[in-house]
Image (tube, helix red, strand yellow):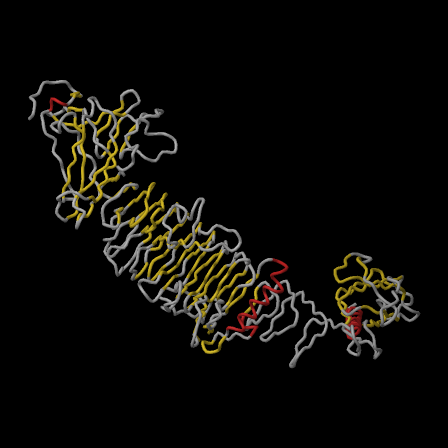
Amino acid sequence: MIKRATLIAVLSIMGLACLAGPAAAQGSRKDDIVFGPSGHPIAGATVTVCQPTATGIPCTPLATIYTDATMTVPAPNPFQADGIGNYHFYAPAGRYVVQVSGPQIPTAITYPDVILPADFSSSGAGNNISAFGLTLGGNLNVAGNATITGTLSSTGFNPGVLTPTTLGVLGNESVAGPRPRVDVTAFGAKGDGVTDDTAAIQAAITSVCNTFLSNTGGGSIYFPPGIYILSQPQLPSTSAIFALPCSGLHLIGGNGSGHAVGGAQFNRAPQARLVVNNAGPNPNGGAVFSTTWPVTGETTWENLTINGLNQAISMYTANENVLRNVCLTTAATGQTDNTPLKITNTFWFYMDGGCLQTTSSTLPMAIFSGETSLHGEAALDGLMYFTGVQGAGGGFQYIQRVNTAGSGPGNFVFRNMPAMETSGTSFLTITNATGNPGSSALPQFSEITFDNATTSDATNATNALLELNSAGTNLSGVYVLNGYAGNGGQGSAVKIDAGAIQNCHVFGGALAVVSVIDGNGVPIGGCSVQSSNGFDYVVNTSNVDRLRSDLFTAGDTNGPAFRAAASGGRFASVAIDPAMGYLFNTGNAFGFGASLVQNSAGTIDVEFANLYAPTAVIATAATGGTLAAATYYATVTSTSDNCTHQSPQSVQSTGVAISGSNNAVAVSWVAPAAGLVPVAGYCVNISTSPICIIRRTGSRSNLARRSFRAQARPARP
């Protein structure tokens, strides 16, 4: 029995080792002899050929076999051996299961792993090679297709066409052509800090935009770690180095060892670096990258440091662009809009991490601008979001250069930006450069948020977080949370040089700025301010309807500095006005200014004025008087007689300079609300002091007295 088993195994091995004859063919030939248990050939034995995964007796599934080497005529399967047990068949090279049975074989014998090697004598086009192991000492050239179901490993691989499901590359990768990710080094870029890579990078961009991108709407351009040298276009050309010709690009720098940092104060690895190193004799002011209508944008830059000359990135009517871990820098060129980042007539911009840097404390880190419309879009920027960005140089600047209408620019967010170094300007400055400061130029700017945004080592100690210098512009919806401006926290949260502000809220921390001032440093209305020591509100008393009886009219933003209403009630019960004092609601109407006087412990007397002060006092220069040259301020009171009995004084006017032939002050005002006694006239007072306090004369007999607790007390002079 041992001898028989050994004999069968040996014959099986012999069958495996049989090679096809020297015929020029595609198929491999299998030749063998069927032996019985006694070692004698068995005539007419049944031979079944199955696929390598076959099981059972008879085995299934069957394999396809042929009668000749060209594999053009299928052979029967199963089939019979000849009179002395010989059999053969042709099949493609590979693994098979062969099963033999017959009258002299008690149980069918199964050979589970029969290998048909490739016919090495085959030649001519279309012949296949199937191998379980292939080691080449030289080169392998494949003119047709190569299908790999396992793992392909190579230290040097450069195919013309490669479409694997999974590809692992242990060595260097260089991929050219229309791929989802195009490597700039495949187009000749070196990234060695010496070679001019401008043309190679442009070729990669063109390849993606002209081939792959046109079919799918997206593609990545990969910059392996390195320093890529660029050349600036020369005048009279006005184009950027890379004017992106299509939307949906993803320009991404490589990571891993060998990353190229430098060229920016706050850059963060991983970042590949692109640097303009050849400015030339007459460089233009174009950016390194620009995206402009009709290219709609939707471009992402990631893990890059871009050292531009006049600008690094420019966007003009190109929406939905993203910068992730990108550092942009520029030199001081003296050219127009010298800034690392310029955004014009654009919506939906997002910058996460990275840095913005200039070489001057007055050059803006970024410029937002509203300029001439290219295809009917609004001439303004909106939905700008910055988070985790560090900066050095001047602050952000918004410039309105053409008239705009409608909602105006807005929705700017600056969050977690704790270091804007060495700035000589405010964190964000809004200006109107149209030459037309009326409402058609920049009527409004809305929704600006500063959340943990600060300046550090500022060159101007009184810089603000937000500065508005645009006459005719109404700034609305400003939120400052833990902001820090100026040097040593001396700056203000908001500074209004020209224009107006309303619906503004400033919340400060231990070192945060909370002041809201005008260009002269005087507190102005429109903002609530909360610091660690309390809550302040500066009301704008120039509102002509600030004493209206209904303080909750829909759409009206004016009113006193404080008002309190019962839940479910429309009208306030108590209000405080800077000029009128406490106001109490009687019959759904405010009309009684009151002063509170403590008479004794536990009691407060409430005294209501008979007269109210005028509002909106304005002083202007005039002639025909004898005033000496100086700056004068005016206040006005109402009187029921000859100024013996007066109302509280009005809010003081702004100062008016008197000199030369202008030797008088003309004063105008708005009549007050009706009091308990008729107004007989007005008392006008002028002073050279910006804080002029007029003391009321007469006794308290002119006051109607009410008290929270009635009790007798002596009259005061």
The reply to whether residue 529 is visible in this rendering is: yes
Could you say which quadrant of the image residue 331 lies in? bottom left
Instruction: Provide residue 551's location: percent of width, then percent of height.
Output: 32, 29
Q: Is residue 377 left or right of residue 551?
A: right
The reply to whether residue 466 is visible in this rendering is: no
Could you say which quadrant of the image residue 386 lies in? bottom left
What's the residue at 51%, 75% (across, down)? Answer: 190
Instruction: Provide residue 317's location: percent of width, then percent of height.
Output: 50, 55
Q: Is residue 687 left or right of residue 80?
A: left
Furthest residue in direction front, as rendered:
624
Instruction: Provide residue 435's location: percent of width, then percent of height.
Output: 37, 54
Q: Is residue 573 above or below residue 404?
A: above
Q: Is residue 639 above or below residue 361?
A: above
Q: Is residue 9 left or right of residue 698?
A: right
Instruction: Provide residue 105's location: percent of width, then percent of height.
Output: 85, 63
Q: Quadrant of the N terminus?
A: bottom right
Along the viewing direction, whichever of 565 and 5 lies nearer the viewer = 565
Along the viewing direction, whichever of 525 and 117 lies nearer the viewer = 525
Could you say which quadrant of the image residue 638 lies in? top left
Along the viewing direction, whichever of 144 and 230 lies nearer the viewer = 230
